[in-house]
Image: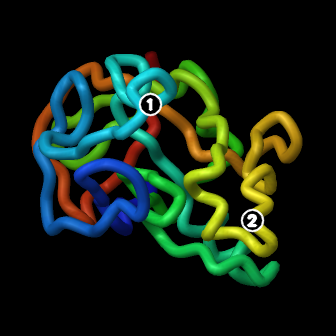
């Protein structure tokens, strides 16, 4: 079992900033906006998740990254990130159920979070297991930092 470290939203772009709670619906967190809806958002990319353990390791490499600066909505801790792959289902808090759909391709908008702007450091193709992931929402509800995260069998 893991925990939600941070929930983050923006009015478009990065960084996404922390909120104390969020309502999650079919299209993700209510009030979160994506500037580029060709590559972000929609039912199959409703939420973006990433592990604090990966963020901290990247900081250890010297990258000026923090939760939300790479555009993730949900920052996790305590789960085996290598298990978080397409088809994996997670329960967030008491009622939100999501299914991971794919790795999130990094883009130049997050370059400021990386030494020399090298955002490809979190490309799932170049560095498997380091990518953020997209998820679709199966069942919505309210989530808060500190809520449990559990793997759910499909």
Q: Position of residue 117 (x, y in %)?
A: 74, 65
Task: Point out the image quarter for the N terminus.
Answer: bottom left
Q: Is residue 38 above or below residue 29?
A: above
Name the one closer to the observer, 110 or 148: 110
Q: Are marks 1 and 2 in contact (CB under 8 Å)?
A: no
Q: Nearer the viewer, residue 90 or 20?
A: 20
- Secondary structure at badge 1 equals loop
Residue visible at 59% across and 46% down? 132
For the point 14% across and 40% down, which residue is it? 30
Category of crowding for the residue at label 2, using alpha-carbon neighbours closer than 10 angstroms: few (below 14), some (14–19), many (at least 20): some
Which of the two marks, 1 or 2, is nearer to us in this view?
Answer: 2
Distance from the alpha carbon under mark 1 to that under mark 2: 20 Å
Q: In the shown orientation, is residue 117 left or right of residue 77?
A: right
Label disc, if present, on residue 40 of the rendered structure: 1
Residue extending farthest to the right is: 126
Q: Is residue 128 above or below residue 9?
A: above
Q: Earlier in the sequence, mark 1 or mark 2?
A: 1
The C terminus, quarter of image: top left
Q: Is residue 10 left or right of residue 126?
A: left
- Image vertical order of residue 95 relative to residue 70, above or below: above
49 or 110, which lies in front?
Answer: 110
Instruction: Report the side of 115 relative to 15 (left or right).
Output: right
Q: What residue do we see at 39% from left, 52% from top?
A: 13
* Residue lying at 63% horizontally and 33% vertically, measured from the top left: 103
What is the x, y in percent for residue 144?
19, 60
What residue did someone put label 2 on?
Answer: 117
């Amino acid at each position: 079992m893991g925990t939600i470290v941070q929930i983050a939203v923006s009015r478009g772009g990065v960084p996404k900033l922390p909120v104390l709670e969020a309502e999650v619906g079919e299209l993700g967190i209510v009030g979160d906006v994506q500037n580029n809806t060709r590559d972000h958002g929609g039912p199959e990319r409703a939420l973006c998740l990433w592990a604090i353990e990966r963020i901290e390791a990247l900081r250890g490499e010297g990258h000026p990254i923090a939760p939300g600066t790479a555009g993730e909505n949900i920052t996790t801790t305590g789960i085996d990130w290598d298990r978080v792959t397409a088809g994996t289902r997670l329960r967030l808090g008491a009622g939100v159920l999501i299914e991971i759909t794919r790795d999130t391709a990094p883009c130049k908008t997050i370059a400021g979070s990386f030494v020399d702007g090298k955002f490809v450091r979190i490309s799932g193709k170049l560095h498997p297991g380091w990518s953020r992931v997209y998820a679709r929402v199966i069942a919505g509800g309210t989530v808060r930092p500190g809520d449990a995260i559990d793997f759910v069998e499909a």
